[in-house]
């Protein structure tokens, strides 16, 4: 997908541990050059609780972020006619991943992911689970075959991160790349 201005994306945050990834991703998307003009943020109920437990505070939308209820289908990106071109689910719980893989659009997150798949737009899922069961692997296979990208929250160490945030940013930067945004980050054997 080509780069263009005024991109609109969806960020769904579901009930897996890993709020740090979502927080850093929101920060980065809000500050990168030619970032999205709108970030639709959708939390599952469990994700709200985990966010508060892991970050110490409730989520407050800033910059281009706008919060939508996961219980309502009255959001532009619930329809293929919308101009939202990318959806990132970070972190992606295995329950959410399984519902999307099996076409169960029982909430806004699953419906928006279904729209991304049917419209052949970017859908990036960031599972934060270990180990994977065969059911998890088969659901990830189904989504991959349908056009989604599975980007496990498995950080890299070759940039020699010195903090937990720097380590988490190795995944966030991969997500930014996969979403098609310009990203000035450490790259293996390119930062000599």
Image (tube, rainbow, N blue to C red):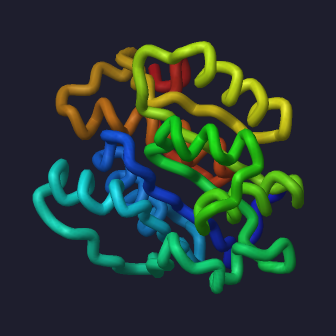
| Residue 34 appears in the picture as rendered | no
Q: Position of residue 72 (x, y in %)?
A: 57, 79
At x 53% / y 65%, what residue is drawn?
Answer: 33
Give the vertical position of 74 relative to 51 (above or below). below
Query: Is residue 44 shown left or right of residue 147?
Result: left
At x 14% / y 65%, what residue is drawn?
Answer: 57
Query: Is residue 147 shown left or right of residue 184?
Result: right
At x 31% / y 40%, what residue is drawn?
Answer: 17
Query: Is residue 28 shown left or right of residue 167?
Result: right
Nearer-the-camera pick, 82 or 171: 82
Nearer-the-camera pick, 173 or 98: 98
Q: Position of residue 82 (x, y in %)?
A: 79, 79
Q: Position of residue 54 (x, y in %)?
A: 18, 48
Q: Position of residue 184 (x, y in %)?
A: 50, 45
Image quarter for residue 49?
bottom left
Give the vertical position of 3 relative to 186 (above or below). below
Quadrant into which the C terminus falls: top left
Residue at the left extreme, as displayed: 56
| Residue 159 appears in the picture as rendered | yes
Give the vertical position of 38 relative to 173 (above or below). below
At x 81% / y 52%, what residue is drawn?
Answer: 117
Number of dots carrying numbers: 0
Image quarter for residue 67?
bottom left
Nearer-the-camera pick, 96 or 115: 96
């Amino acid at each position: 997908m080509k780069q263009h201005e005024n991109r609109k994306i969806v960020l769904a945050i579901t009930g897996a541990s890993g709020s740090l990834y979502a927080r850093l991703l929101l920060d980065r998307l809000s500050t990168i050059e030619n970032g999205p003009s709108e970030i639709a943020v959708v939390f599952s109920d469990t994700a709200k609780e985990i966010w508060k437990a892991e970050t110490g505070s409730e989520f407050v939308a800033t910059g281009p972020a706008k919060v939508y209820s996961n219980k309502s289908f009255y959001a532009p990106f619930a329809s293929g006619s919308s101009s939202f071109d990318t959806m990132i689910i970070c972190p992606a719980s295995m329950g959410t991943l399984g519902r999307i893989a099996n076409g169960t659009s029982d909430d806004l997150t699953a419906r928006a992911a279904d729209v991304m798949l049917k419209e052949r737009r970017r859908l990036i899922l960031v599972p934060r689970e270990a180990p994977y069961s065969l059911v998890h692997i088969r659901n990830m296979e189904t989504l991959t075959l349908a056009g989604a990208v599975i980007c496990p929250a498995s950080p890299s160490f070759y940039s020699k991160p010195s903090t937990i945030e720097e380590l988490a940013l190795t995944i966030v930067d991969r997500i930014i790349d996969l979403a098609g945004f310009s990203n000035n980050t450490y790259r293996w054997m390119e930062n000599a």
